[in-house]
Amino acid sequence: MNDEWQNEVDPDEEIIYISKSELKRDAIMHYELGQKLVNLSPANLEKIPMDAQLHEAVHLAVKIRNKHGAFSRQLNYVGKLLRFRDLEPINIAIAKIENQHLIANQYFHNLERLRDDIIAKGDDAINQLLVDHPSMERSKLRQLARQAKKEAEQNKPPKSARQIFQYLKENIPAEG
């Protein structure tokens, strides 16, 4: 019996020991990834590459979100399933989704900056904008800028500033 067992173990094979701390860090990482999956919107969740078992577990966790004990157990289960999956495609898909939000925010901040420049600098900012976007109407931008300045001076609601923003949004495409 003893000789058979020794034949199964290769003496040249390297034994890798994993500490308890590393196992805990991995478990926490998988749990947090499961939380990210559960917190995604249904449309974004469909963009994540998951097998049927993981997909079902995540959707069940979304359904039982309000039942604290059951939700926590389900999240632990999702984390356990993630331990045996290739996480790279899942992490890449989540990063793309998170990056889309950053790009959208950056786009809107850019439009707000352009609007503020048009109101503050007038024709100079409008001329610079028309160099980059010649299809826009100079007269409409000038009129809205004048109205926005007048509204600001009279402490009225910024209706024209909102119209400038809307006009910019309609005529300047978002990248990505």
Image (tube, rainbow, N blue to C red):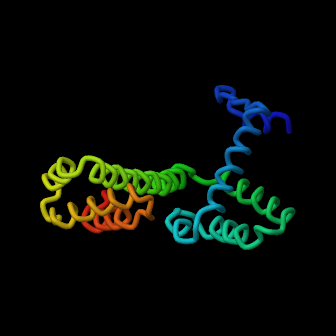
Quadrant into which the C terminus falls: bottom left
Residue at (67%, 66%) from the top-left corner? Answer: 58
The single residue placed furthest to the front in the displayed view is: 154
Q: Residue at x 32, y 55 (%)?
A: 115
Quarter holding residue 155: bottom left
Residue at 73% x, 32% y is: 18
- Horizontal and vertical percent position of residue 146: 26, 60
Residue 100 in the image, given as x and y percentages of width and height: 44, 56
Residue 26 coordinates in the image, percent (x, y)? 70, 41
Q: Position of residue 131 (x, y in %)?
A: 13, 52
Does residue 144 show up? yes
Q: At 52% from the left edge and 66% from the top edge, which residue is drawn?
A: 44
Viewer-side residue, 89 vs 153: 153
Figure disc tally: 0
Q: Nearer the viewer, residue 40 or 8?
A: 40
Quadrant in the rendering for residue 141: bottom left
In the image, residue 98 sits, relative to residue 139, either above or below, namely above
Query: Is residue 176 visible from the viewing direction of this image?
Result: no
Q: Does 21 sit left or right of 118 as displayed? A: right
